[in-house]
């Protein structure tokens, strides 16, 4: 099972690279002489690279040995983060982020399928959960530590640190992952057709809405904490750590409630997320209440994530290679849209305090879509 640890370490590195930039936006903006709103588009660029690159790479590498493609994706990741650390300008950093993002969705999609295929039948779900745990650990440990390193030694050192974790992941994965992993025989056209079902497309759309709601605010969490809430710079890392703990709790809750009337649970947690966003709008100027609300918000938001992942895979059983990758693309499309929406609002001189209200509107639409999905699924199962 050592390969599971290597896969988890790899997803930890990949997600740390994606999210750590949000804790360093003020430093990056100052260093490259761009406004924070423009620096936020670096998050959008990375997410769009995942959206576009993931499905294309997954389909185009369907006949490549699984170990070979996973190691190759880690090489892209390592080189990309080194390029980020060396980027002399905003445009070159943008290009380096795009290059790095190409490995993200495909690695998650293939890694989860490989973990399941190499596990005993009764441990398949657990194996996939361990792979995705890397994303949670990235928010609990990677982002706060990366932010702290970047604030102490400069933002470029954060990308160097992530590249080193990538090298460690490559080394362990190369030694522990079996070479003869069987390829799944499936037609890409049949898989794409299976993904076109309404009960698959709506959960994918919900994944987009979930992360669009999250990243409209979370992309600008560092400047919000500093400029609106009045949290000292050195305390931002602590708040990010607390936020990561909330994400972990939310993930565990989502796994628990996902087995109990999943659609109803999704509606409940989406609704709770909406109330948290309203409370955040009210509490944002006050450090104690604002941080407390952010903690509860992180729990409610991330509880939905594993339920949507399970729902997408369950509804797209005939598309084993694409379902997980497409859901990663959906999440990152949401990341991109949320970061872009926040950037547009700030560019048009709207107050940072109004960002949660935009997120609230997105969540309200997600609740409506989930109710429609529930009725659709009930109609299909009715005698």
Image (cartoon, rainbow, N blue to C red):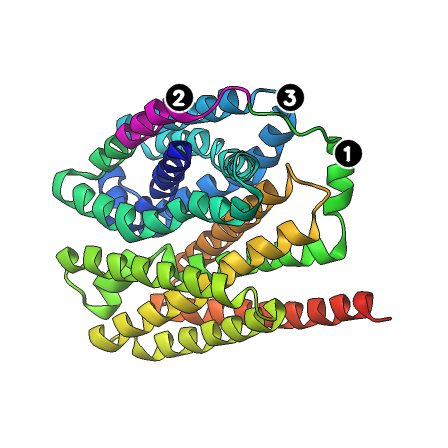
* Lower position in the chain sequence, tag 1 or tag 2: 2
Instruction: From the viewer's side, name the closer residue of 315 and 220.
Output: 315
Q: Examine the rendering and report whether any part of residue 88 can be seen.
A: no
Could you tell me which secondary element the residue under label 3 belongs to?
loop
Looking at the rendered structure, which numbered label has been put on residue 189? 1
Q: In the image, is residue 379 part of the stretch drawn in magenta?
A: no
Real-space Cα distance between discs 1 and 2? 32 Å
Q: In the image, is residue 172 part of the stretch drawn in magenta?
A: yes
- In the picture, measured across the screen, residue 35 lies left or right of residue 151, that is right
- Closest to the camera, between mark 3 and mark 1, is 3
Query: Magenta segment, which residues?
Result: 163-180
Q: Examine the rendering and report whether any part of residue 329 can be seen.
A: yes
- Closest to the camera, between mark 1 and mark 2, is 2
Quarter holding residue 87: top left
Could you tell me which secondary element the residue under label 2 belongs to?
helix
Instruction: From the viewer's side, name the closer residue of 254 and 192.
Output: 254
Q: Which residue is mark 3?
A: 63
Q: What is the quadrant of the C terminus in the image?
A: bottom right
* Lower position in the chain sequence, tag 3 or tag 2: 3
Q: Residue at x 35, y 65 (%)?
A: 352
Q: Residue at x 48, y 31 (%)?
A: 103
Instruction: From the viewer's side, name the closer residue of 244 and 314.
Output: 314
Name the spot of residue 4 as percent of width and height, x first: 41, 37
Q: Residue at x 41, y 32 (%)?
A: 3
Q: Residue at x 45, y 78 (%)?
A: 275
Q: Which residue is mark 2?
A: 174
The secondary structure that most of the magenta stretch takes on is helix
- In the picture, measured across the screen, residue 16 lies left or right of residue 236, that is right
Could you tell me which secondary element the residue under label 1 belongs to?
helix
């Amino acid at each position: 099972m050592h390969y599971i640890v290597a896969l988890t370490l790899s997803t930890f590195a990949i997600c740390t690279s994606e999210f750590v930039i949000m804790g360093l936006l003020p430093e990056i903006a100052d260093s490259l002489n761009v406004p924070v709103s423009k620096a936020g588009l670096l998050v959008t660029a990375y997410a769009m690279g995942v959206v576009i690159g993931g499905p294309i790479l997954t389909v185009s590498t369907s006949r490549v040995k699984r170990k070979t493609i996973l190691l190759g994706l880690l090489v892209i990741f390592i080189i990309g983060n080194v390029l980020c650390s060396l980027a002399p300008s905003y445009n070159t950093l943008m290009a380096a982020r795009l290059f790095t993002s190409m490995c993200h969705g495909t690695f998650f999609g293939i890694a989860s399928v490989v973990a399941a295929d190499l596990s005993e039948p009764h441990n398949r779900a657990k194996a996939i959960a361990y792979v995705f745990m890397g994303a949670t650990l990235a928010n609990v440990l990677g982002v706060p530590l990366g932010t702290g390193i970047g604030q102490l030694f400069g933002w470029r050192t954060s990308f160097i640190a992530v590249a080193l974790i990538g090298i460690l992941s490559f080394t362990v994965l190369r030694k522990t992952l079996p070479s003869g992993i069987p390829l799944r025989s499936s037609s890409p056209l049949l898989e794409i057709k299976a993904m076109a079902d309404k009960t698959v497309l709506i959960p994918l759309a919900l994944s987009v809405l979930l992360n669009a709601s999250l990243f409209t605010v979370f992309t600008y969490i560092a400047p919000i904490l500093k400029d609106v809430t009045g949290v000292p710079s050195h305390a931002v890392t602590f708040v990010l750590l607390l936020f990561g703990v909330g994400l972990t709790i939310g993930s565990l809750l989502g796994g628990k409630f996902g087995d109990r009337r999943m659609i109803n649970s999704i509606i409940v947690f989406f609704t709770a997320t909406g109330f948290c966003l309203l409370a955040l709008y009210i509490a944002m100027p006050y450090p104690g209440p604002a941080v407390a609300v952010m903690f509860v918000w992180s729990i409610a938001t991330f509880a939905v994530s594993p339920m949507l992942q399970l729902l997408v895979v369950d509804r797209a059983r005939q598309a084993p290679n694409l379902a997980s990758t497409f859901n990663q693309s959906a999440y990152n499309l949401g990341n991109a849209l949320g970061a872009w929406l926040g950037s547009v609002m700030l560019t048009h001189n709207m107050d940072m305090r109004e960002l949660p209200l935009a997120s609230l509107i997105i969540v309200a639409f997600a609740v409506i879509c989930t109710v429609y999905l529930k009725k659709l699924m009930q109609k299909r199962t009715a005698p």
